[in-house]
Image: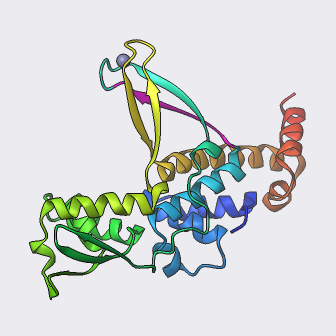
Amino acid sequence: MRPLDATEVLNVWEHGLNQPTLERALILIAAACPELDSDAVAKLSIGARDARLLQLREWMFGSQLLNTAQCPQCGERVEWEGETTELHIQAVDDADSAEEFNLEVDGYRLRFRLLTSMDIAAVMAAAQSDSNIGSTALIKRCVVSADRTGKACDLADLPQHTLDALSQQIEKLDPQAEIRTELTCPECSHQWEVLLDIASFLWIEINNWAERTLRTVHRLASAYGWTEREILILSPVRRQLYLGMVNR
Ligand SMILES: [Zn+2]
């Protein structure tokens, strides 16, 4: 995995414009991880995927995160600040999704793998025709085989309690899949935990950056006659300085 330069980020942004968030995250990782083919990128566990997105975020925009959340008790909009370095709980090379694990619970023996973007895409597609499909369907996709007292059993027969235990186990093995942070409301002192959806968060930042950058290219190209390529290989500091001179 390596950082992307300005031209590459713009290409990713353009390519991802009309795609769903899930697809955008995969396009971004594929560009930054030439060592992985597109199938391997889609099969990264959600934790492994999000660890990579956090790393990319740090390279592109630094480690400081500013976000807002709404207090579930009084509805106050709360601004919060965090560091990506504090949210990094899984190493970038961790959690190979092809790896299989075992869990024995309630007399069932389950063989399973971690949740991937492909699972989420499949369940989202199914949910369009059947709105009852949800987290249970997602967990079931991770089960490679299940048996009870040596006899193979059908996924449909697994009790909810067993699936819940499996869900907890997957979360433990792939901790970066849920990026949580504790917040306290300044209005009512209510404390709660928010989840950071790094894929959506990063895309919004990339979108803002791309629009700003294209405007800068337009201004500098108009003023100096440089090509887009020539402008994009300038460091951000130089682009900003030239822009300041043009705007003067
Ligand atoms: Zn509150």
Residue 124, how many percent across, how many down?
A: 28, 63
Q: Quadrant of residue 130?
A: bottom left
Q: Quadrant of residue 73?
A: top left
Give the residue at the far top of this rendering: 187
Looking at the image, in which quadrant does ligand 1 appear?
A: top left
Instruction: Name the residue: 89% across, 40% down.
Output: 242
Residue 224 in view in this figure: yes
218, 157: nearer the viewer: 157
Residue 65 belongs to magenta span: yes
- The residue range painted magenta reads 63-71
Residue 196, how many percent across, how many down?
A: 47, 43
As drawn, 217 above or below 116: above
Instruction: Name the residue: 66% across, 67% down.
Output: 32
In the rendered image, the quadrant that contains the N terminus is: bottom right
Instruction: Name the residue: 48% across, 61% down.
Output: 47
Say whether residue 149 is left or right of residue 177.
Answer: left
As drawn, 202 above or below 90: above
Q: Quadrant of residue 186?
A: top left
Say whether residue 66 is left or right of residue 237.
Answer: left
Residue 60 belongs to magenta span: no
Instruction: Name the residue: 53% across, 28% down.
Output: 80
225, 135: nearer the viewer: 135
Residue 207, how many percent across, how many down?
A: 58, 48
